[in-house]
Image (cartoon, rainbow, N blue to C red):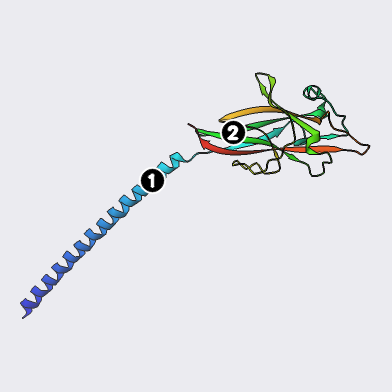
Amino acid sequence: MKSQNYSDEIIKKDSNNKLFIIIIAFLIFIIMVIGVSAITFTYTKEKKSINTISTGNIYLNYTEDTNGINITNAYPMADDVGKVLTNEDQYFDFSVEASITGDVVANYEISAEKDTSSTLNNDEVKLYLEKKVNNSYQEVMAPKYFTPLKESTDLGTMAGSMLLDSGSISKNAIVNYRLRMWVDANTILDNLEKSFGVRVSIKAKVDLAD
């Protein structure tokens, strides 16, 4: 009887050992599956990380302490005169600057937002924009009445503002602009003080370079 009990204990112990080995093997299998999944997930994450781009910044820089131009009690003048105004209060210099990393291109739009205190009508004022190319300024927008957009653009330039120029920029670059504004020659002024002001703003969107 004692011998039979001893044999039963050996069988039971052997069964427990086998069960333990099976459990260990199963756990190892689970760990291997989880490990492979983790590696796959990590690889996916790293691959996504490679495709992630760092766009940096694109912003406006002003040479003055203001971000626009105003005209007050100015005399009407012809376009040929307005295009070459040289007094500091008659033109506005600014630049679009980019600090971008990665193989990307930033598309941008420059717009003029009308000051709500302006008393001159939109068709009484001309705006003229030039861009600096090879150390000289070249026309990018011919003299034009203030023309507000009827709808906002895809880049985010708001309806009601006037689109001045658009372009693209990449890496570390600077694009210099000069804006002039004057009272149109056909405007009839009364004795009341008249004014017109705009603020320059920029909207940009980054796309992958071709």
Specify whether residue 110 is in view.
Answer: yes
Q: CA distance from mark 2 to mark 1?
A: 29 Å
Residue 81 image offset from top left, x and y in percent: 81, 22
Which residue does the numbered mark 1 point to in the structure image? 44
The local secondary structure at tag 2 comes to: strand
Q: Which percent across, then down, holds residue 2? A: 7, 79
Instruction: Report the residue that reaches farthest toward the right.
Output: 191
On screen, 5 above or below 100?
A: below
Residue 99, label in figure: 2
* Residue situated in front as seen by the camera: 135 or 151: 151
Residue 165 position by quadrant = top right
| Lateral position of residue 2 relative to residue 76, left or right | left
Residue at image location 45% in from the left, 39% down from the top: 51
Q: Residue at x 21, y 64 (%)?
A: 20
Across and down, in percent, residue 60 comes to 67, 35
Q: Three-letter amino acid code at disc 2?
A: Ser
Task: Name the foreground residue: 65 vs 39.
Answer: 65
**Residue 55 in sight from this viewpoint:** no
Q: How many marks?
A: 2
Q: Is residue 84 above or below residue 208?
A: above
Q: Quadrant of residue 160?
A: top right
Compared with 32, 203 (above or below) is above
User: Is 30 located above or below residue 11 in the figure?
Assistant: above
**Quadrant of image for the N terminus:** bottom left
- Residue 102 drawn at (x, y percent): 50, 34
CB-based contact (under 8 Å), mark 2 and mark 1: no
User: Would residue 164 appear left or right of 65 to someone viewing this image?
Assistant: left
